[in-house]
Image: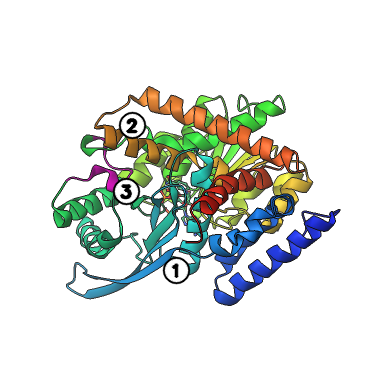
Amino acid sequence: MSILQTMSQEEVNARDYVQDVYETVVKRNPHESEFHQAIKEILESLIPVIAKHPKYKEHGILERIVEPERLISFRVPWVDDQGIVRVNRGFRVQFNSAIGPFKGGLRFHPSVNASIIKFLGFEQIFKNSLTGQPIGGGKGGSDFDPKGKSDGEIMRFTQSFMTELFKYIGPDTDVPAGDIGVGAREIGYMFGQYKRIRGGNEAGVLTGKGIVYGGSLARTEATGYGTVYFVNEMLKSKGLSFEGSTVVVSGSGNVAIYAIQKATQLGAKVVACSDSNGYVYDKNGINLETVQRLKEVERKRLSEYVKEHPDAIYSEGCQNIWTIPCDIALPCATQNEIDETSAKILVSNGVQAIGEGANMPSTLDAIDVFLKAGVLFGPAKAANAGGVAVSALEMSQNSMRYSWSFHEVDDKLHQIMKNIYRNSVNAAEEYGHPGNLVVGANIAGFLKVADSMIAQGVI
Ligand code: NDP
């Protein structure tokens, strides 16, 4: 409980209550360290809210909000190209529907388990609330590894996955989207299978669809662009900007690619990016065209980059990417990729701002280092909310049977990111932690959900 040193009696009581709830979560969900980490971060930042508004304790909001409405786990059998039967595990957590249908991506990665899905689903509740749109929190995925699989194998797996998942989703109940390992190709196959089983065209059941069959313009770009828009607001508050800055971005997937693109458009030089094997440092600035072709079209490893750009250096392993001096760091790969040591190196190299494009990329200790050093810190649930915000705009367009232009969607995204920033700043200030956007985003996201839960009774 490090963030509150001088506390009123109400805050001491609130802290003890929060600690009880946290301990129950740990006991009830043993060995789920990522889930515990996400719960701890949010509950701690809610102490001033619980202290000020006893109604949240009286209505058991914390006890209820940490327990998913439903967690579905299922078998996903499929046949590989050699005719061998494979079995993966599928998940969907429907965490909280107080403010709208469950909404959140699907992740295909060998590390996926109940802990990962629950941490992501829990975070999603607050992120979705922050967007200002009526969407609840959910998440799902599988321990299936798409790397090295043929197109046919991807299709058979995703069809089998959807053959079970379809029972639990729908445009008004639960609307999945992409995440790590799930892009336009996978969404396309899943949408096709859902349509085939349901026998109707319910476009709003998935987001991240291709533009030609109901997708939204700017959805592909939304998370990366949104992260940069958010960081830009933080920088402006200190009279800084992307113009002329040096930026390091981890990852080379959907979020990373469009973060690199927008940061470059705003005048930054992005000197490094990575994949799960290693990272590339290019002092001339990362050539995005090469990265996109290698990763999205040819589905190759980033190590190939240096063959086309001999000035660039490729290093095996991901951790040392954070030793590259930069003004702005945008972790856009995966959870816990910046630990305390990396955070200290970033700070000693003079980093000014961190924008979390990935979900929970900084450990709790790393966040502490950034906040204590006065580094501008944009937490994931605020900084990367642009993806789900535009997913909600995709749902709106599907309902209206109408499409907005790229420019219209991008403008709305930009405005949403500014609002999220402003609301987080205001909440942090109102609850006694000026400038702390971790606390601000958590509180701003929490209040709407908690008040809706009270209004809807004990369910
Ligand atoms: P992609 O699958 O498109 O890209 C993921 C990137 O991160 C790849 O470069 C991948 O490398 C790398 N990566 C994945 N796992 C690891 C790991 N364990 N160690 C190091 N690098 C890794 O996913 P997205 O870009 O969509 O997602 C990235 C992050 O952003 C995730 O945390 C996701 O939850 C979050 N996010 C995504 C949103 C979206 O709209 N897509 C919305 C909000 C958050 P490799 O190619 O080798 O696998």
Please, what is the three-letter code of the amino acid marked with disc 3? Asp
Left or right of residue 166, residue 103 in this image: right
x%, y% of residue 76? 28, 70
Q: Which mark is residue 92?
A: none
From the image, which quarter does the N terminus lie in?
bottom right
Which of the two discs, 1 and 3, sits closer to the camera? 3
> Which corner quadrant of the image does residue 112 belong to?
bottom left
Q: Which mark is residue 172?
A: 3
Q: Which mark is residue 113?
A: 1
**Above/below status of 436 relative to 414:** below
Please, what is the three-letter code of the amino acid marked with disc 1? Asn
**Above/below status of 114 relative to 452:** below
- Give the extent of the magenta segment: 201-211
Say which of 279 and 66 sits in front.
66
Q: Magenta stretch: dominant SS?
A: loop
What kind of element bears circle 1? loop
x%, y% of residue 214? 25, 37
**Above/below status of 117 relative to 375:** below
Left or right of residue 345, residue 96 in this image: left
Q: Counting residues from the N terminus, which is met first, the one under dot 1 or under dot 3?
A: 1
Left or right of residue 443, residue 129 in this image: left
Q: Which mark is residue 217?
A: 2
Residue at image position (68%, 47%) is 439
Say which of 43 and 196 sits in front.
43
In the image, residue 208 lies in the stretch drawn in magenta: yes
Please, what is the three-letter code of the amino acid marked with disc 2? Leu
Q: Is residue 90 visible?
A: yes
What kind of element bears circle 2? loop
Residue at image position (39%, 40%) is 392
